[in-house]
Structure formats: structure tokens, C-alpha cells
Amino acid sequence: MATDITSDLEVEGSQVLVFHADESGTDPEYTGLALADKDDLSIPIDEDDEDFNPGATRRTRRYRTNNTVDAEVSSAIATDLSGLEKIGVAVEDENGMAITFKTEDRRIGYGNDEWVGMAYFKDDVLKRLKAGDEIDLLEDSELCHRLDDLELTSPEIDPSETPPQVSWTWWVEGDPIYIDYYPDNGDE
């Protein structure tokens, strides 16, 4: 039996671009929300189950009953705060940017063509991006998570860090959850 082993056994990039995707128009729009280290991200998955022990058998049967998925992000605060406005941490009014607690401000997806991605990049790709070159988020990333139907909760702003940090958690309620998202664009 032949066994193939790939030469690329791990994701090399340590930097992750957390971005908002809006695919409602003819051209998708991607907005960077945070550039974070892998250590500042987490996607915990919690699955619950129930046990059932039928009297005629010795083996207990288990049934998965539900699961929860969260996406946790921590990043430096950008000076323009547009990313925080995009995800619903803050809204702009006549006096500046204020924290919002309204559910409608804190939801992404839910029936429209918006979602959140986390794209891992090698350093050379990020250098091209910082130099002003255009990159394709989905094609140039090593790995891209896609999360749909998110509700923001638990934003935390820590001004004691240098630079000041912000962290937040999304409750992921969409399905499926892509570990690596690479849509077929019809290019064959």
C-alpha cells in the first residue's frame, strides 16, 4: 500500500489576519479587523452528550446532544477604531466612538452574505501587504477559517498594555464551520 506524506506538514505563519467579509455585492469586500499572533486567538469547541444504559446490554450508549463554538480574539487597538465598529464593539455618534450593547450592532451574518475569517500568512506575504501590494486573502493564506452567524459578547479593553489591547468573543452559531475555507470560484 502506498502512503503519501506531504512536505508541508504544518502552518508556518504565526500572524493571523482576522477579517470581515461582505459578499453581498458583485465584488467581495474584505476588511481587516485585527492582525494578531496565533497565541492571541482561540476557537474552543464544547460538545455535550447524554448517556443511555439499556437494560439488555452491558455497554452504555452515548449521544451527542449539542455543541457550542466560540471565537476569541485579542489585538492591539487601531487608532481609527473602524474594526471595532464593524464587529459591533463600538458605534460612532456626534461625540465620538462609544461602546454599544445593542444586539443588532453585535451580529454578523444571520441571513446576509457576511462572515468572519481568520487567515494565517507567512511573513513574506504580510510584508507584501504592508508594502501596499494587493493580495488574495483566500489564495495567499496558508489556512483560512470561516465562521458564519456570529454574535459578539464580552469585549474587553485593556489600556494598561502597550499598545492598548482589545479582546472579544464571538458566539458562533452558523454551520458549517470551516477550518480551511477555499471556495470553488469556477476556475477549472
Image: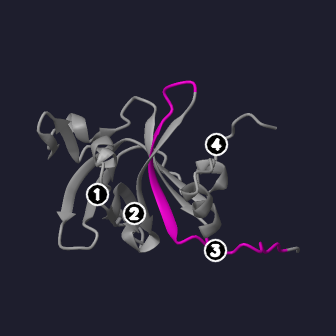
* Residue at the limit of the structure toward the top, as seen here: 26
Return the residue at label 2. Answer: 43
First in sequence, mark 3 or 1: give its number: 3
First in sequence, mark 2 or 4: give its number: 2
The image shows residue 121 at horizontal and vertical percentages of: 58, 63
* 161 or 23: nearer the viewer: 161
* 134 or 91: nearer the viewer: 134
First in sequence, mark 2 or 3: give its number: 3
Asked if residue 146 can be seen in this view, the reply is yes
Q: Residue type at mark 2: give it.
A: Ile
Q: Secondary structure at mark 1?
A: strand
| Figure quadrant of residue 43 | bottom left
Give the CA separation, mark 2 to mark 3.
18 Å
| Circle 3 crowding by C-alpha within 10 Å: few under 14, some 14–19, many from 20 | few
Mark drawn on residue 169: 1
Residue 7 lies, with reference to residue 49, above or below; the image says below
| Figure quadrant of residue 46 | bottom left
Q: Secondary structure at mark 4?
A: loop
State which quarter of the image contains the N terminus: bottom right
Residue 5 lies, with reference to residue 94, above or below; the image says below
Return the residue at label 3. Answer: 10
Q: Residue at x 15, y 35 (%)?
A: 93
Residue 47 lies, with reference to residue 4, above or below; the image says above
Q: Secondary structure at mark 2?
A: loop
Return the residue at label 4. Answer: 183
First in sequence, mark 3 or 4: give its number: 3
